[in-house]
Image (spheres, rainbow, N blue to C red):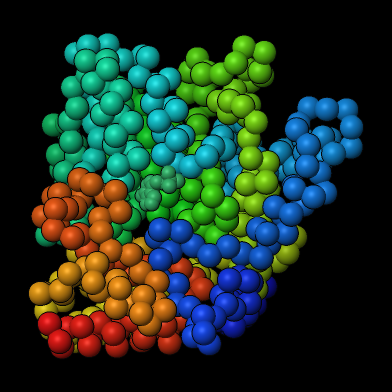
Amino acid sequence: MTMTERNSWNDDEVRAAFPALALRDDGVARVYMDAPGGTQVAGRVLSRMREAMVDHCANDGGAFRTSRLTDAGFATVHAAAAEFLGAAPDEVVFGLNTTTLLFHFSRMIAREWRPGDEIVVSRMDHDANVAPWLIAAEERGVTVRWLDIDPETFHYRYDALPSLVNPRTRLVACNHASNLLGTINDVARIVAAGRAVGAVTVVDAVQSAPHFAIDVAKIGCDLLASSPYKYFGPHAGLAYVRRELADRLRPLKVRPSPQTMPFKHAPGTPSFEAQLGTLGALEHLAWVGERFGGAVPGATLRSRIEAGFVASTAHEHALARRFLDGLATLRGVRLYGIGDPRALDERVPTFCLRIAGRDPAAMAEAFAARNIFVWSGSFYAYEVAGALGVRDDGGVLRIGFAHYNTMTEVDQALSLLAELAAGA
Ligand SMILES: Cc1ncc(COP(=O)(O)O)c(C=O)c1O
């Protein structure tokens, strides 16, 4: 028995789990709608980081108490991260961030490429899952093919896959959820096409991991990256590396350092505090599952996290529905992404828009003046912004929700958008 009766979602209780949400500036509450750029940090994260930096601040592998505790923390974190991803503990690699992890792995993976080989990258991705492969392809004389997006539907052009992937394809890299469009992609389909020809498959899960449970077994990829600072944790990168790939790749590291996973692909001293902080983020997600998803405290971490996402998704969908309904009443607003409130399963609550005659940067400033934190630009979604024709033109305004946002906050954003639309 892993489920109990569910408590209904309680904004106050959820928000109390985030110390930063209590802060005010000259008496004005902060409205954080910058989640796609980085979320606020759960209190559990801070406790875990304090533990790493006060209770047992030592390098790993020693005979003394604090070092032993660091070793134990490392093992606990890898086991928890494995549950989070649906992987095994020796398939988990921590790094500085997703970009650094993907550059690091690209160097090792590209050693296997020969001139005449091909790779497939996508126009939906953040450049972190494009540039490492482009640079490696140039160095190895490899042809680059592009998986395009449909600017009308904001989905990938899946029908192009058969013409892009062939026996010469060595790598297929794709995006799980777009940081600009918000689209959730059928990565299992893209990965299956790559694996069918023996290509290494890479998924960027940075924007999906904050919103639903990742299952690398279901996706079937070889490498998947996420960034805990996007899901209530510290600045860090967290990757899944399929055991066969991890074993096959010759590591880039100093010779005396352990050559077996989970150490093999993590050169140098890691941020033990970021690792324990990530554990705190996963504990936060599990707590959401216990409080609002009906999970019992003794259930597995994964099942509690999954229950948490069921509950938080329902809340995020309610916010997104309200936002889209409100947006539909405004004139001159163009949403870059799926706008049908009945299709919320196809997107995360990240909304990019423009208002005719308004500069996105000036709009972000208008929001900032009300202490509402939003981004403008194109957020390194370089190809997407290019395909939509907004890259060299100020980009878009991005309003993103996390599970700590409220209906009141959504209404605040809508009312300012209405003012901006009316005055445009
Ligand atoms: C989809 C996506 N991929 C990759 C990244 C880069 O992540 P990091 O900052 O951890 O390198 C981001 C950051 O915004 C992102 O949104």
Residue 305, image quadrant? bottom right
- Left or right of 386 on screen, residue 102: right
On the image, the x and y values in percent for residue 109 come to: 39, 21
Q: Is residue 14 above or below residue 168?
A: below
In this view, the residue farthest toward the right is 64
* Residue at 28% across, 45% down: 125
- Residue sticking out furthest to the front: 26
Asked whether residue 180 is in view, the answer is: yes
User: As displayed, is residue 74 above or below residue 104?
Assistant: below
Residue 6 visible from this viewpoint = no
Placement of the C terminus among the 4 image quadrants = bottom left
Image quarter of residue 58 = top right
Residue 386 placement (x, y as % from top left): 15, 49
Q: Using the image as rendered, state which of residue 26 and residue 157 is in the foreground.
A: 26
At which x and y percent is residue 300?
Answer: 68, 54
What percent of the width, then of the height, locates residue 317? 39, 74
